[in-house]
Amino acid sequence: MSSILEQLYFGEIRPEEVIVPKNPEYGSINKKISNLKEQLKLMLSEKDIELLDETFDLLGRSFSIYSTEVFVHGFKMGALMITEVFDNKG
């Protein structure tokens, strides 16, 4: 078994692929979004459906960028807390 640093270096750790929110609303909300999207597709033209799909794709990319920033910020805060714990000034 390789160390966590080796796993990180080799790209074996991908938090976004294993994190599933435990909040019960998460699944319910995503199901509603999916159902509403399907309802819209029944009412829209092909061109409108393409616009809708493009909008959802862009929203997904935007959320991914935001999630990455949140992860990095949280990781940095965790590292700062660890350094403070081991700092002998206090």
Image (cartoon, grey):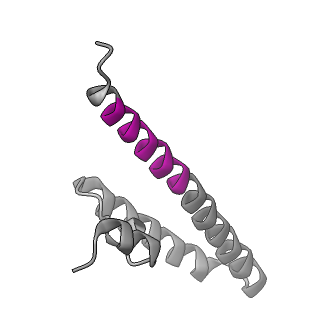
> Is residue 17 in sight in this rendering?
no
Against 43, is 32 above or below?
above
Q: Quadrant of residue 25?
A: bottom left
Which one is nearer the viewer's eye here, 14 or 19?
A: 14
Q: Residue furthest bottom?
A: 46
Tell me where residue 55 appears, x and y as whole percent: 68, 68
Q: How many marks?
A: 0
Q: Quadrant of residue 47?
A: bottom right
Q: Residue furthest front?
A: 88
Tell me where residue 81 appears, x and y as whole percent: 34, 32
Rendered residue at 55%/50% (across/down): 69
Quarter of the rendering occupied by the C terminus = top left
Which one is nearer the viewer's eye here, 49 or 67?
A: 67
Q: Main secondary structure of the magenta part?
A: helix
Q: Quadrant of residue 22?
A: bottom left
Q: Horizontally, is 22 left or right of 13 in the view? A: left
Rendered residue at 53%/56% (across/down): 68
Q: Horizontally, is 23 left or right of 6 in the view? A: left
Which one is nearer the viewer's eye here, 17 or 74?
A: 74
Q: Residue furthest top?
A: 90
Rendered residue at 49%/43% (across/down): 73
Q: Is residue 72 magenta?
A: yes
Rendered residue at 31%/67% (across/down): 4
Quarter of the rendering occupied by the N terminus = bottom left
Tell me where residue 19 appears, x and y as whole percent: 32, 64
> Is residue 25 in sight in this rendering?
yes
> What span is colored magenta in the figure?
67-83
Which one is nearer the viewer's eye here, 8 or 73?
A: 8
